Image (cartoon, grey):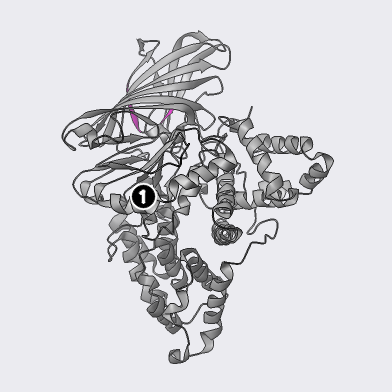
Amino acid sequence: MHDADPTSQSNYLQIATNHITFDWTVDFDNKVIIGTATHDLVAKADEVSEAIFDTSYLHIEGVKVGGNAVQDFTLGPKHEVMGSALRVPLPRTASAGSSISVEITYRTTANGTALQFLEKEQTQGKSFPFLFSQCQPTHARDLAPVQDTPSVKVTYSASVRSVLPVLLSARRVSPPSDGPAHDGKVIGKDEVVYMYDQPTPIPSYLLAIAAGNLQYQPFQVPEGKLWKSGVWSEPELMADSFWEFSRDTTSFLAAAEDIAGPYQFGVYDLLVLPPSFPYGGMENPCLTFVTPTLLAGDRSLTDVVIHELTHSWFGNGITHAHASHFWLNEGWTTYIERVLLQIIHSPAHRGLSSIIGYKALLDALALFEDKPKYQKLVVDFDYGENPDSAYSRVPYDKGANFLLHIERTLGGLEVFLPYVKDYIATYMGHSITTEIWKNHLYAYFQKNGGEVKIKALNSINWDAWLHQSGLDLPVKMEYDLTLANPANALADRWYESRHTMDISKLDFKASDLDNLDANQRAVFLERLESYNESLPAPHLFHLDKLYSFSKTLSAEIRFRFYNLVLKSQAAKHFVQEAANWVIGVDATGVIKGRMKFCRPVFRAMSKVDHDLAISTFRQAQTQFHPIAQSLIAQDLGLNLAER
């Protein structure tokens, strides 16, 4: 069906897991998970003599095949990216269609990247430790022995013993979510067994666990909907979390169903994680993980939830076959997210999101000028190459613009959205490549439009979009500027004032921002950053005095402000302040673990004062997630093994 996954050592094309049963104990004292993973496998070919699983930094204690212990399993040498292949010989060769069970007893270790155990001091409540996982793209093998490729989709069930409440990317079986926390037992002391079931097949990167002092509050679900929704957080954040997300989450999900069809996972909960979580959100089924930086206090950042719930169809439903086709997840999700913004709000909101995304795309493309293959939509990864190294806005925004270009080429949303529904209906539950997607697109419009639509599709430069590098999009895209124009006009006024040396003669006021929402303020700052000549330092000091960007609690605004000033004559004035902010030794008191914020700020700091950037990172290194630690170190030219 497709080429083999270059990041997996498993033999999933010969024999593949259908279902996994996990039996786990969370050991907070030793910061490990102990237990078993029992795989129900089905042979895909004849004469299969072994099952090969991906593992990384796991201690394998024993293996049973068909209920019988086997001694001659082997754990291969450690590959830096792919880990160690666990080879389990089968007692007899399997033929296509036959089933077999493999039970693996193991424990995780401190070296793995999938799990982050936080000390109680790193949590909001500072009373209990916390655990959360991040398995995308290839870190599930650090949590459990699995065939760690998105080409394999599995159902799973789990039994988890823990002294703290446990959440998984599955439906809670017991104790009930809306019952007393920790089944009424003493949190942090009494062990409770949590039972979960995930009946919808998912790829291994969507395996997820979180455990801590967590409480639940349900959202009101629109009448007639069969799914449930709510929010989980530490008690100290519950009031803010519920207020931030309760109004919009279920209406967003209902709007997505109108475009994409029924939501298939039964539960859509949000979990607000501690600040070291490295992403804005992670679309774990039934349980989207979100960063606390979304708690802006004004619901201005809840559109991230639109993105994450849209993954329920694009990524969790239709999945990329492997990392080379990651854009099928993120490009589609970002495109539909913006369509939903148009439907929920207005075409101008879709345009504003596109403008912000385009700026982020240009920054990402420039960052990869020396690694041009990461500028492509379809990345030809070498065998064993780390897909984390390519992580950027490219698959999101180049992908979304590609789909927007196709939409416009074919005649707009009223032509394109019926195709979207057919695409979802055809491939829901499957893992596909770019070629499979393209072939279906052509087949649909051959049937629903004939030669006129085929001629339109043939006019697209497919090679340029999918397989060529470059510092810009292959086509100049036009966006709705209605909401961007006021922000751009204010930025232009500031830029035109740069030759006025007497600051007292400037006619700017704090009220300039009154009619600009958070996204428009972001566009204002990005416009200022885009000019060939930066504002003089006195202008930037005056701008900050009026608008208080260096004091705002909005991380989206603060990091853009630092991006602006750290490229200016005022850089040395602001660099220490930026350093304090990114590691939370300022009035916020919170580390900025989200890589969208910390990586650009560290890179900008490094160009101003490289030694300060390194010492700041070293000071707080262990508070960042292992994935973020690795990528920040890469940005700063550091070897984490050297201190």
Of all residues, the one furthest to the right in this rendering is 451
User: 18 or 29: which is nearer to us?
Assistant: 18
Of all residues, the one furthest to the front in this rendering is 223
User: 181 or 76: which is nearer to us?
Assistant: 181
Q: Is residue 556 above or below residue 411?
A: below
Q: Magenta stretch?
A: 54-61
Q: Read off the residue under disc 1.
A: 640
Q: Is residue 6 above or below residue 534?
A: above
Query: Where does residue 189 sit, x and y in percent of width and height?
Result: 15, 35
Query: Where does residue 470 sit, x and y in percent of width and height?
Result: 65, 56
**427 with respect to 194 (left or right):** right
Image point (59%, 71%), residue name: 485
Image point (54%, 43%), residue name: 256
**129 with respect to 143 (left or right):** left
Would you say residue 308 is visible in this rendering? no
- Dividing the picture into quadrants, the one containing residue 32 is top left
**288 with respect to 438 (left or right):** left
Would you say residue 435 is visible in this rendering? yes
Query: Where does residue 590 sit, x and y in percent of width and height?
Result: 30, 58
SS under mark 1: loop
Query: Where does residue 101 sit, x and y in percent of width and height?
Result: 42, 14
Instruction: Estimate how packed mark 1 is, as few (under 14), some (14 to 19) or many (20 or more) residues with alpha carbons within 10 Å.
Output: few
User: 418 or 488: which is nearer to us?
Assistant: 418
- Magenta residues, dominant SS class: strand
Q: Name the kind of residue labelled 1 in the image.
A: Leu
User: 508 or 137: which is nearer to us?
Assistant: 508
* Figure quadrant of the N terminus: top right
**157 with respect to 490 (left or right):** left
Residue 204 among magenta residues: no
